[in-house]
Amino acid sequence: MNGLFWTVLSVGTAFSVALVVGLLLGRWGIASNPARAVVNLLTQARGAILPFILAPMLLSLGSSDWCAIGVAAGWSQAVAVARWMHRQNSEWSPSLLGGIALGQSGASLAAASARARGAVTGTLALTVIQVVTLEALLAWAHDGAQARDSLGAWIAQGGSNSLLGWLGLTVLLLAVESLASRLLQGKSLDPEWFRSRRRV
Amino acid sequence: MVESLRRLLWLVPLLTLGSGALFALLSSTLAPPPPGQFAFFNRHPADAEGEARLALELLERDEARGSARLIELGGAGLPHVLSRLDTFSVKRQKRVAHALWPLVGRIGLDDPTGAPDDGVDASDHQLIFWRQFYEEHSLDFRPLSVQRLVKRLAARDLRLRSADLLVVDSFALPALIEELGRVRTAADVERVRRLSALIAHVSGRSFDLPRPASISQARQLATDIRAFWDRENGAFSQLSKLELLGARTTQTEFSIWVRRSWRQLNGVDASSLVPRLLRGGRVSAPLFALTLLGALVLGPALAAWVQVLQMRGFGSAGRQAPIRIVLAFGLCTLVPGTLLHTSSVNWMLGLSSTLAGTLSSAYLLQRELADRIDWRTRHVLARQEGLGRVRAVVRWLGPSIPTLAPLAAAEAAIWVTCLELGAHVHGLGEETIQAVASADLPWLMLAGLSLGVVTGGMQLVCDALLGTARLRWGEG
C-alpha cells in the first residue's frame, strides 16, 4: 500500500501543477501574441527536456522522489494543456461568447475555455499514466535498486508485483478520469446544455 | 506564410539560446563541471605569462611544486621567466635556473657551456646556461617563426625542423595542434604521426600512434589531442589583453562543448556520438515512427469511428468510450512493456508502440470531439447520410491533429524509451537513460536539442497547416 500512497502523492502533485500552471499559461497565451510565442517556446522546451531527464535534475537539487516525479510529469502536462487552450483554430461556443460579451474576467474566461475543451480534460486525465510511466522508467533505469516503492516500480519489477501495479493503475485511472471530467468538463457546468436538454 | 517565415528565421537564435539554457540546466544539476572548471564564465582565465608568474611565486613558497609547474609549462613559460631573470636577486635567479634545469634534456640541447669548471658553482653554471640560451634563442620564441617551422614539419619529415621546434618546446603547442587538421588520407596519417610525436614529447602526455595506423586511428588520436588542448590551451597560449578578456568566455565548459560539437559536425573530430546515434537509431527510429503513426493517423481514425458510432445511436457506447479507451491505453502500453521484460520480440515492440500512440491520441481526440460537437450539431449530423456524417466528424477533428502533433513527439519519445527499457533493447531511449545516470553531458545535449528541433519543426509545420486550414474552412 505504501507504493500506492507515493504514487497518489505524485499524481496529486502532477495534477495540481498541470491544472494551475497549465490554465495560467493557457490563459496568458490567449491574452496576447507574445504570450503565445512563450507557449510555443515552452512546447519546444517540453520536447527538449523530457520528464525522465527533468525528474533526475530535480532529484539532484534535493527534491524528494514523489515531488520530482510529480513536478516533472505535471510540467509536461501543463505545457500540453496550454497548447491545447491557446490554439488558433478554436471556435467559441455561444455561451462563451456571451460570457465575453458580458465582460467576465479573464480568469473566468480562461477557466470556461478550458472547461469547453475535451482535449484539456483528456490531457489532465492522462497525467496518471505519465506519472506511472515515469516511475517505471526510473525504476528500470536504476535496475530496481534505487527505485522507491511505487506503482511504476511494481510494474517494472514484473511477476506478481506487476499485477498489483496494474490493479492500482486501473483504480487510479478511473479515479483521475472521473475527477478530471467532473472538475473540468462536466456538462452540468454548462447551463445552456441543461436548457437545451429540457427543450429536446 | 509570413508568420511561418518569421518563426523559421527565429529558429537559429532560438537554438543558440536553447542550447545555452539546456547546458546551464544540465551543468547545474546532472553534470556539474569538473573542479576548477567553469560553465559559462571564467573569472581567472589562464595564459602563459600569468601561469609563469604564478609558477615563479609558487617557487618562492614551495620549491618542489614551483619547479614542477615551471617544467610543466616548459617553453611556453620560458620567454616570460627568462626575460624577468635580471629583475630578481642573484639568489632567486639561481633558484629559478636550478628549477628550470630538467628542461635542458627535453629541449634537446647539449649544454653549450660544457661541464662546470673547477671552482665554478653548479648553480652559477646553470644560471650562465639559461642566460646564454635566452640570448641565442629569444628570437625563436615568436609565433610567426614557430608557425612556419610547424608548417614545414607538417608537410615533410624534416628532422632538422623537428630539432628547431624542440628548442621552443611547448611554445609551439598552439601551432602544432592547429596543424593537425583533418585526417582523411594516408598522407594525413603521416602528418599526425610527426606532429603527435612532438606534441607528446613537449606536453609529457602519451599520444602514441601505432605503426602502421589506419585513418580512423589517426583521426581518433588527433581528436584526443584536441580534447586535451581544449582544456589545457590557456596555460600554453600567449594571449594579448584583448584575447585574455575573451578567454573569460572561451575557457569555459560551454565553449569547449561548442568547439567540440562544431568540429564533430564538420567531420574534423572523430565523433563517438554518431556511431551511438546510428546504432540506437536503428532500433528507436522505427518504434518512434510507429508511435507517431499511431498518434497522428490511427488514433484520429479511431476517435472519428467512435464518434460516428455514437451518432448512429450507440449512445451509451459513446459515453463510455473515453473510459474504455483510457483503460485500454493504460493496459496496452504498460502491460506489453512488462511482458517484454522477459522476452524481446520485435513485432510485439512495434505493436506496443503503435498501440501506445493510437490509444493516447484516440482518447484525447475523442474527448475533444465529444466536447466540441454539441447537442445541436450532433442532432443535425445524426440525420445525415453515413458518408456525410463521417465527413463532418473528420472536419471537426482535422484541426486538432496539428495541435496534437508537436506534443505527440515528446510523448512518442517517452513511450519508445519505456518499451526499450522494458524489453532490454538497446536504443536511443536506453542510451539517454544511461547518459542521465552517467552524467554524459554531450549525449544529453544532443538528445535534448534533437528532440527540441524535431518538436519545433513539427510545431512550425503544424501551425502553418492550421493557418491554411482555418482559411480553407472559413473558421478565421
Image (cartoon, coloured by chain):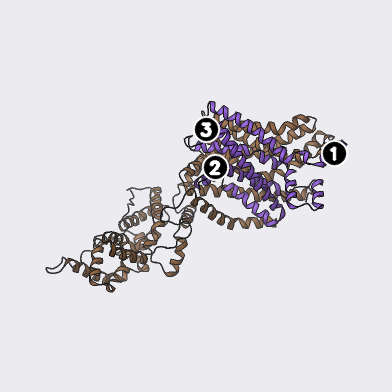
Chain colours: A purple, B brown
Residue B339 image label: none
| Residue A105 seen by the camera | yes
Quadrant showing the N terminus of chain B: bottom right
The residue sitting at 75% across, 47% down in the picture is: A90
**Residue A147's x, y, as percent?**
50, 36
Asked whether the residues under marks 3 and 2 belong to the same chain, the reply is no
- Report which quarter residue B307 is drawn in: top right
| Circle 3 chain | B
What is the residue that sits farthest to the right in this orientation? A199
Q: Which residue is labeled 1 in the image? A: A196
Secondary structure state at the residue bearing disc 1? helix
What is the residue that sits farthest to the left in this orientation? B118
**Residue B276's x, y, as percent?**
48, 43
| Circle 1 chain | A
Q: Nearer the viewer, mark 3 or mark 1?
A: 1
As shown in the figure, which amino acid type bears the numbered disc 3? Ala
Q: Which residue is labeled 2 in the image? A: A52
| Residue B290 seen by the camera | no
Secondary structure state at the residue bearing disc 3? helix
How far is the residue under mark 2 from the one under mark 1?
46 Å
As shown in the figure, which amino acid type bears the numbered disc 1? Ser
Judging depth in this view, the residue of A105 and B72 nearest the camera is A105
Q: Which residue is labeled 3 in the image? A: B423
